[in-house]
Image (cartoon, coloured by chain):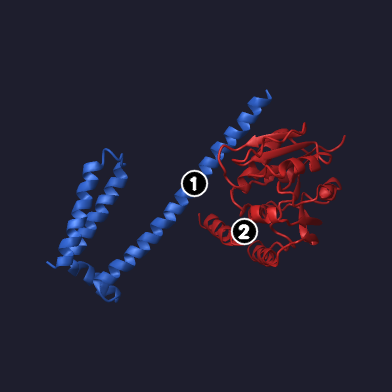
Chain colours: A blue, B red
Amino acid sequence: MLPSQVILSAIIILIISRTLATRRKKNLSKNFLFLWLCFWIGSLFLILQTKVISKFAEILKIGRGVDLAIYLSIILMFYLIFKLFIRINEAEEKITKLVRKQTIEETKSKRV
Amino acid sequence: MRDKIYIIIPAYNEARTICKVVNDVEKYVDKIIVVDDGSNDGTAEPVKSKKAIVLKHLVNLGQGAAQETGFEYARMNSPDIVITYDADDQFVASEIPSMTKPILENKADVVLGSRFLGKTINMPLSRRLVLKLGIIFTYFFSGMKLTDTHLGFRALNKKALSLIRLTQNGTAHASEFIDEIRKHKLRFVEVPITVKYSKYSLKKGQKNSNVFKILFDLIIDIIK
């Protein structure tokens, strides 16, 4: 095993163990916990079985396995950022509706 | 019976000018709706006109949100005409009748003020260029050929008020307003008006760099 594989695996095992240890305190939903663990376990598998990702890279004619991993990570990050923007937007809409409702009701009650 | 005219003035930290603006518009309208968008300079306090009502947002949401709050309040009271007006004393109140005239003559559902058909005083060149870009952008994306697309001086009749809904909280609401006109096939005209630029209004108003934020907000709206 390469030193990089050891270091990365150790970091991922730490992340997984911290997630499991603090899951109750942080009130994580089952769905999020499941996806989060799947992601890190999957990453651990690919780090330890580099032949798998290298095979995919070869099929896609990308070059090295690590290049494929980087491209996929960038795509995933942009997708997550986009989803975050949508969620922030939705939260903003809800806040606006609440503030507007409260503003108008407060005005109506003052005039009564 | 005379038409009932309301005016909506969204305001954020405009304690310096709000009183003058309310006093100026008072004689032209029946009701003044000042929407205090979470100001922290006591904007709402000096407003004393008998015709004025102040709606106060608990937090700052943006000019678009403040305008829509004003619209929603107005809808509950069924005015015949609603005017939107800025709180920074850039507009000339005596031009209100020219804004309402096309609606009173049933020639339009929406009247849009245009500084480029009218007059500008002390307008920086950079602002002129950015606004001209906005006109091109609006034409490109909505097909609406206008001479001024980002002016807060507008008039709506009952039909337009009932149909137009602003969901953009920030300055992109101006582009959204144009889109709503097109979406609901409302009749519109542009009317020449005067816009006065002062050091205060330029400092308080939109920055030229806001154009990127407006573009971004509109793109997010399209994608979602």
Q: Residue at x 72, y 45 (%)?
A: B17
Would you say B198 lies left or right of A78 here?
A: right
* Tag 1 subunit: A
* Tag 2 subunit: B
Residue at which label 1 appears: A90
Q: Amino acid at mark 2?
A: Lys
Would you say A11 lies left or right of B94 here?
A: left
> x and y percent of residue A95 in the render?
52, 41
Mark seen at residue B207: 2
> x and y percent of residue A75 in the render?
37, 64
Q: Residue at x 77, y 59 (%)?
A: B115
**Within-10-Å neighbours for mark 1: few <14, some 14–19, many 20+:** few
In this rendering, the label closer to the viewer, 2 or 1: 2
Front residue of B84 and A47: B84
> x and y percent of residue A19 in the render?
24, 46
**Distance between the alpha carbons at the discs numbered 2 and 1:** 26 Å
Front residue of A105 and B202: B202
Residue B37 sits in quarter: top right
Q: Amino acid at mark 1?
A: Glu
Residue B56 sits in quarter: top right
Quadrant where the C terminus of chain A is found in the figure: top right
Up/down of B221 relative to A99, above or below: below
| Both labels 2 and 1 in a single chain | no
